[in-house]
Amino acid sequence: MTQEYSVLMSVYFKEKAEYLRQSIESILNQTVMPKEFVIVCDGPLGSELNAVLEEYSVKYAGLILIHRLPENRGLGHALNEGLSLCRSTLVARMDSDDISLPDRMERQLRIFEQNEADIVSGTVIEFSDDVANEHGRRVLPEQNEEIRRFARRRNPFNHPAVMYRRESVMKAGGYGDFMLFEDYHLWIRMLQMGCRGYNIEEPLVYMRSGKEMYERRGGIRYAAQIIKFRWYLLRCGYAGIGDFVVTAGGHALVALIPNGIRKKFYERVLRK
């Protein structure tokens, strides 16, 4: 396997140092190591997070690059900054509180060698506290045509498990200013310009899904963003009026129900 890849992570002050350490370690324990590991600090961090980053940047000098932004600007802006620093053709996303399986990158690199893909994602296992405490799995359509249809109503890739061609992302304009839907917005633009996707059906990443995650997906603000994004999909011609009515109404309703009920809905209806 000859292809090189970069890893791109963004971290901000609300993250836990313990989670960040576990996330970094999961990259350093890959069966195929990255050429570089770019970590963008989205604004000032606390002492515990800075201590973790300092430790690893010294221990793995030449591999880990820490890039600090003066203020918190949001995930999309931080990732665009990081992409400008990545030197590899392929870039793997990594969230600062998730854990990649040891052979995640090897599997994704193999797909890029075998397929004309621009985006390769895979199944994520949602958990809280310990990876043994599994809540569910988000399994997505495997092939490109299935992915394109699926994208009309639901996010077609698991962002925490994505590896993509840097050039294709840059041609699509990178991450846009679409709060809470930065990744979905990018995928739609890439698919519209002819980029091809693939989803590995096996798990690649353990993704934390405690009550905080479901709280972020609730409330009037989130419901408003849902309607705004679904209206965008309709206006740009990717989705039809039926898709808009079903997804805008249904998704917004889920955002407005109590957090405990919303959590059960995700786990029992939207997950396997």
Image (cartoon, rainbow, N blue to C red):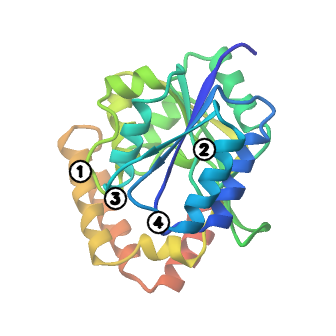
In what element is the residue under mark 2? helix
Numbered label attached to residue 36: none
Measured Cα–Cα span from mark 2 to mark 3? 23 Å
Q: Which of 113 and 256 is in front in this view?
A: 113
Q: Residue 142's spot in the image, x, y percent?
A: 61, 35
Query: What's the amino acid at mark 1?
Result: Ile
Query: What's the amino acid at mark 4?
Result: Phe
Which residue is under mark 1? Answer: 241
In what element is the residue under mark 3? loop
Numbered label attached to residue 161: 2
Query: What's the amino acid at mark 3?
Result: Asn
Cβ–Cβ under 8 Å for marks 2 and 1? no
Measured Cα–Cα span from mark 4 to mark 3? 9 Å
Which residue is under mark 4? Answer: 13
Mark nearer the N terminus (2 vs 1) = 2
Mark nearer the N terminus (2 vs 3) = 3
Q: Residue 60's spot in the image, x, y percent?
A: 69, 38
Q: How crowded is mark 3: few (under 14 residues within 10 Å), some or many (20 or more)?
A: some
Q: Residue at x 30, y 62 (%)?
A: 226
Numbered label attached to residue 72: 3
Count of labels in the image: 4
Q: Which residue is drawn at 79% across and 37% down?
A: 103
Cβ–Cβ under 8 Å for marks 3 and 1? no
In what quadrant of the picture does the C terminus appear? Answer: bottom right
The answer, for residue 253, to whether it is visible in the render is yes
Q: Residue 55's spot in the image, x, y percent?
A: 67, 51
Mark nearer the N terminus (4 vs 3) = 4
Q: Residues within 10 Å of mark 2 (few under 14, many from 20)?
A: many
